[in-house]
Amino acid sequence: MHAALAGPLLAALLATARARPQPPDGGQCRPPGSQRDLNSFLWTIRRDPPAYLFGTIHVPYTRVWDFIPDNSKAAFQASAHVYFELDLTDPYTISALASCQLLPHGENLQDVLPRELYWRLKRHLDYVKLMMPSWMTPAQRGRGLYADYLFNAIAGNWERKRPVWVMLMVNSLTERDVRFRGVPVLDLYLAQQAEKMKKTTGAVEQVEEQCHPLNNGLNFSQVLFALNQTLLQQESVRAGSLQASYTTEDLIKHYNCGDLSAVIFNHDTSQLPNFINTTLPPHEQVTAQEIDSYFRQELIYKRNERMGKRVMALLRENEDKICFFAFGAGHFLGNNTVIDILRQAGLEVDHTPAGQAIHSPAPQSPAPSPEGTLTSPAPVTPAAAVPEAPSVTPTTPPEDEDPALSPHLLLPDSLSQLEEFGRQRKWHKRQSTHQRPRQFNDLWVRIEDSDPKRSVLLNLYYRHGH
């Protein structure tokens, strides 16, 4: 659900064992011949008026926007209400995130981590800080981003954070991910546009609901294991004995021009047991599997059930409005998904291929139309009244799902970028009291200067969000 996707779960914990070949750049997909050739992560809830589910990927929107079909953009344009995993327009989101990451009782990492692990972590972060200027791009510097600022935005106050959040942070401090910092992830970009278009926005989750599984579910030895394995991976990359993981780039490539479902859920899992058996001692295999199982249950199944029920509640509250729900694509793919929850409750939910016309009444918000011409509307079948959803949370993962990649997509992986954009807002204010904050260029409609108080400078997962 993902970055900069911040930390694969089992995959990240085991990545020290095997180098992976470098993939082609995620943006190097051939331009499609027609709209129908594009991937579609849009589903239509059949009612009158319709509602839409849209699968996002928690990466900079510039990496994927040109590959999102026009009918997905038109569905967003036609909607009156837009809902995300978290409320990206609420300042409370960033303050709650900052609080949930901190160690309790004023503790510091040096107080809780083994001495050797703490100093390895500090050395690695010193290395990242040293390398950050060479990792950054001219485009980032042109937007006024500098290495010291960017490092502090991502890793600031790291000594006060809980080890599990430091693990996610370390996974996001790679050269490739750093090069795309400073651009809103797709979820945030849509939230910015929805606010600019005066749409009603909201969320189906609270920050605390995404933080709680990370802060409270694992015992301390499991957290130390995860942080140590993550650090081992990054140290191996620095030493040249391991190529950097390309999960983010792989997901971008498949979101744009491949089959994301195949990457996440239909990977050849038969290789995984042998991989585990030959790379970790038995007791560490058990630990890795326990962590994976816990996160799968908490970050996939339980969240999907909760999100599905809240989607239905919002549909009941807004029976006469077109609603658009933008969640990480992984919540709609595989088994026991949000879509499964809705269908089991009696709703009719259909995948909407690229190029297929959608129900498109006159826009319900005063905003420019997206580029491209909408075709004639498709017939819409009213849905039955929305009933309550049964509980479908499984206790064990389905056999055909990949235990390494599924939770990874759904981690609140971009939650760290919330802080980046929150800090950037303050940073711009310090730079000049006479100029409005610099705005990001928009690939759909041109962003004009707006009231800084209304600017949305939050960047989600939401690994994740994750």
Image: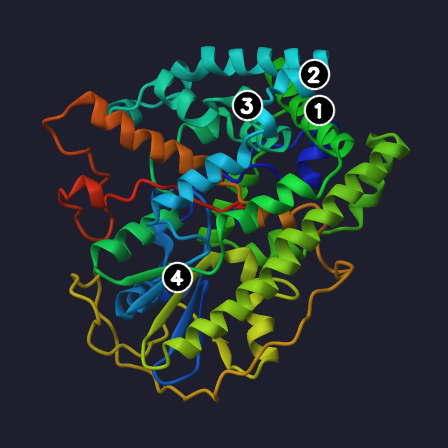
Q: Which residue is mark 2?
A: 117
**C-beta proximity under 8 Å, tags 3 and 4:** no
Q: Secondary structure at mark 1?
A: helix
Quarter of the image for residue 156 reads: top left
Precedes in sequence: disc 1 or disc 3: 3
Badge 1 density bin: few <14, some 14–19, many ≥20, Cα 10 Å:
some
Label 4: few (<14), some (14–19) or many (≥20) C-alpha neighbours in 10 Å: many
Sequence-earlier tag: 2 or 1: 2
Could you tell me the amino acid type at mark 3? Arg
Q: Amino acid at mark 4?
A: Tyr
Q: Which residue is mark 1?
A: 228
**Residue at 74% over, 31% down:** 220
Nearest the viewer among 188 and 404 is 188
Q: Is residue 373 left or right of residue 64?
A: left
Seen from the viewer's position, the closer of residues 113 and 148 is 113
Residue position marked by numbered label 4 in the rendering:
83
Q: In whole angstroms, how far apart are the C-alphas of marks 1 and 3?
A: 18 Å
Is 336 placed above or below 319 here? above
Q: Are marks 4 and 2 in contact (CB under 8 Å)?
A: no
